[in-house]
Image (cartoon, rainbow, N blue to C red):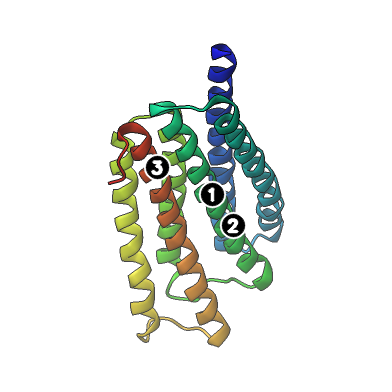
Amino acid sequence: MRAVFQQSLSELQDRLTLMAELVEASIGEATTAFGNSDAELAENVIERSEEIDALSLSLDELAFDILLRQSPVASDLRLVVASLRMSAELERMSDLAEHIAELARYRYPDSAIPKGLRKTFTRMGALDVEMAEAVVRLLREQDPAIIIEIRDLEDDLDKLHAKVFTKMLSDKVNADALGLVDATLASRYHERFGDHAVGVAKQMQFFFSGEIA
């Protein structure tokens, strides 16, 4: 029974890591599609979202099965609880990548990025990709130092999010009403993606120490 229990916990971690890897691929393709007006790449992200949703459901079912059948305690219990929470965070990150891809698809063949904001959005996208990659490393390596890295990246992302609104209120951005709406939504999606990455980091902190900092 103990061997079965450990195998189940290992499978839980594997599914969680796979989810994170798929999310990393999605945000990478979403930001490229958004920057390059690539409708085909945007469709890839939208289709992958269903795969991530299905994986999240299977992970949650496995976690509940472990809770019901194995009655884990201490760090094992924290792992199962944290996995359920991280599954929800990763699923939401996937949704946000999908939203960014949808903006690119809706505006195709035009660009969804107003003039004057391209560099800012390029950097926001790069930060989200870095955070997604850091989340994958955190799940694989379980190195607490990566938690700090993710939080630092989020601080940079928050500053860029604020910068978008400052620029939109200035005369440096040339866009119609729809373009301004797109920029507002895209900036929010990028910023929220970072928030959920931090959410994953917080749950890993809970797994490590039993506390959420």
**Contact check, label 1 and label 3, Cβ < 8 Å:** no
Please give the label number shown on residue 203. Answer: 3
Residue at the disc numbered 1: 88
Q: Residue at position x 66%, y 57% from top?
A: 42
Q: Residue at position x 54%, y 49% from top?
A: 88
Q: Is residue 192 visible?
A: yes
Q: Residue 31's x, y, as percent?
A: 54, 56
| Of the two numbered discs 2 and 1 in the rendering, the one whose residue sits closer to the viewer | 1
Quarter of image, res 210: top left
Q: Distance between the residues labelled 1 and 3?
A: 11 Å
Foreground pick, 30 / 92 = 92
Question: Dot 3, how many residues are within 10 Å of its Cα: few (below 14), some (14-19), or many (20+)?
Answer: many
Q: In this view, does 48 lie to the left or right of 23?
A: right
Q: Residue at position x 50%, y 50% from top?
A: 89
Q: Residue at position x 65%, y 43% from top?
A: 57
**Contact check, label 2 and label 1, Cβ < 8 Å:** no
SS label for mark 1? helix
Give the vertical position of 76 relative to 116 (above or below): above
Which residue type does callout 1 highlight?
Ala
Residue at the disc numbered 2: 95
Closer to the chain start, of discs 2 and 3, is 2
Closer to the chain start, of discs 2 and 1, is 1
Please give the label number shown on residue 157. Answer: none
Quarter of image, res 102: bottom right
Q: Distance between the residues labelled 2 and 1?
A: 11 Å
Which residue type does callout 2 highlight?
Asp
Q: How far apart are marks 2 and 3 (CA)?
A: 19 Å
Question: Dot 2, how many residues are within 10 Å of its Cα: few (below 14), some (14-19), or many (20+)?
Answer: many
SS label for mark 2? helix
Which residue type does callout 3 highlight?
Gln
